[in-house]
Amino acid sequence: MKKTPQFSVRTGPSLGLRSEMLYGHFIEHFHRQIYGGVYDPGNPLSDEDGFRTDVLEAMRRIRVPILRWPGGCFVSSYHWKKAVGPERTPFFDKAWRVEDPNSFGTNEYVRLCRKVDCEPYICTNAGTGTAEEMSDWLEYCNLPSEGEYARLRIAHGFPEPHHVRYWSIGNENYGWWEIGAKTAEEWGRLVLESAKMMKHVDPTAELSAAALADIDWNVSLLKNCGQHIDWISIHKYWNLMANENVFATYDESMACTNDLDTEIRKVRGLLEAFGLEKRIRIAYDEWNLRGWHHPNVHTLRQGVDREEYITPRDLNDRNQDYTMADAVFSACFLNTLNRNCDLVGMACFAPVVNTRGCIFTHPEGIVLRSTYHVFDLYVNYLGDEVLNLWAEDVDTMPVHTKEGRPEDVEVLDVLGTRFSKDGTLAFAAVNKHPSETKELTLNTGVHGVYRSRRITVWGECTESYNDIGHTEVTLSEGAWRKGEGSLRVRLLPHSVNVIQVRPV
Ligand code: AHR
């Protein structure tokens, strides 16, 4: 007779308070993320500044805490000075090989962040850019009035500084695909010189730099810059589809939920080796189950005509491809980030709008994809204190990787949290099983009578999705029920749930 899995709250200290920036997002000048996405002047749904009000409202609903911009690969040949002020000339984007209208630049981006009420997080050009260009950008954004660039911002109609606190030096400059790719030694030196100049402009700025779980790269970075940077940036997409738009099935996506903390563990070990684990935090500032589709760009064989390398990008926009696999995977990854909240202080879902994002726009409105409801659930129903749980009798299920390799994954993934303001407990409980309802017991440690309820993100089958005029995946709140002692819960197949427990 199989035992019911048990999840118990350990007595003793919690794992810590998670940063709200774990629920951050990323937006890039790629395809329809900016133009036709969040920024759509002339659309009846857009406000006086050209921003889609339906998108702004959806971003506010999931309380986007930080928004990374402008790239991504785009940034490695981007020159910010051409994109401020009244005179804007469209420029050729050498990363994605399209003309950028250049009507959206730093000031439009900061205005977007103020409308969403989120922190700006600017990624600088460490491809073709220089330490001086990066530090000039900080002058423009953060100096009150000293020097050429603060005066330029004022002349552009912004008397007050933009107060951009978070800056990334470069994107993925370790990658051969990145414009201006660097060796580990070159990277350590460029980051050091850039960090010095940026901190000279604004010592309160928090700087991140691209890192890999690659030893040589990180050793050079930490050896050169350990005392100058505040964050280490990690990116990961599990279902890579740059050239072939072939989606991992539900079963294959569940295989991706094994070892979600691999990169975190490796970087944690490196930081501890350098004695930097108390000083530098991880910014997982690009993540998504689904890699973006952009064929014949990131290869040495470039597309020659639009059909070869631009038109296929529209395949990112097929809403039926974003299913409960995306929701269940994303919940498991957010659980992993929360469990590592002592080191991971920021994460950015890539991206927030269109491409593989959680919000899809079309001229008459938006579609909230399955992953949007997971962010709604985590941001609005989970606590800020991460509890230390232990699990017993959790069973596994067989799955296969996209390469066909058999693996076992744990069927349940449960995160414990507490609202530090009132002591309410909230457990994020994921049932990965594609067809079976699963029971579990929560030993909450609450003494006496409590009320509990379950909030669920669910669609009837693993392939459920949302599209224009088609809603299968929803977030629904259950009723509060009284209880006492251990709490037995039944989780629907392929479901993401939060169980709240409030002492009476
Ligand atoms: O596929 C999009 C790209 O993925 C981003 O521009 C880059 O940062 C990452 O390699």
Image (cartoon, grey):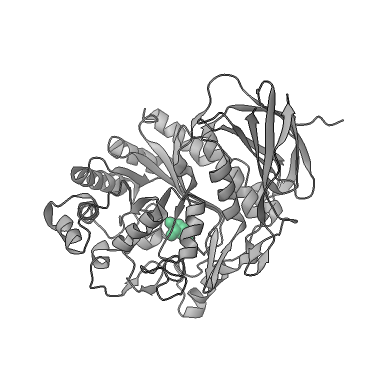
Q: Position of residue 221 (x, y in %)?
A: 33, 41
Specify the quarter for ligand 1.
bottom left
Q: Is residue 448 visible?
A: yes
Residue drawn at x 33%, y 73% as measured from the top left: 92
Which residue reaches farthest top?
12
Q: How many marks?
A: 0
Q: Is residue 66 above or below residue 108?
A: above
Question: What is the residue that sits farthest to the left in this orientation?
Answer: 147
Left/right placement of residue 352 relative to residue 184 reads: right
**Measuring 72% from the left and 40% from the top, which residue is drawn there?**
411
Residue lying farthest to the front in this orientation: 504
Residue 213 appearing in the image: no
Residue name at image x 18 percent, y 50 percent: 144
Q: What is the quadrant of the N terminus in the image?
A: top right
- Give 208 or 489, whichever is nearer the viewer: 489
> Which residue is more in the foreground, 502 or 173?
502
Q: Closest to the observer: 414 or 306?
A: 414
Quadrant housing the C terminus: top right
Q: Nearer the viewer, residue 248 or 143?
A: 143
Residue 289 screen position, x and y as percent: 57, 53
Q: Where residue 205 sits: x, y (%)?
A: 28, 43
Report whether 308 appears left or right of 478. Answer: left
Is 238 left, or right, of 278 in this rendering? right
In this picture, is 255 found above or below 352?
A: above
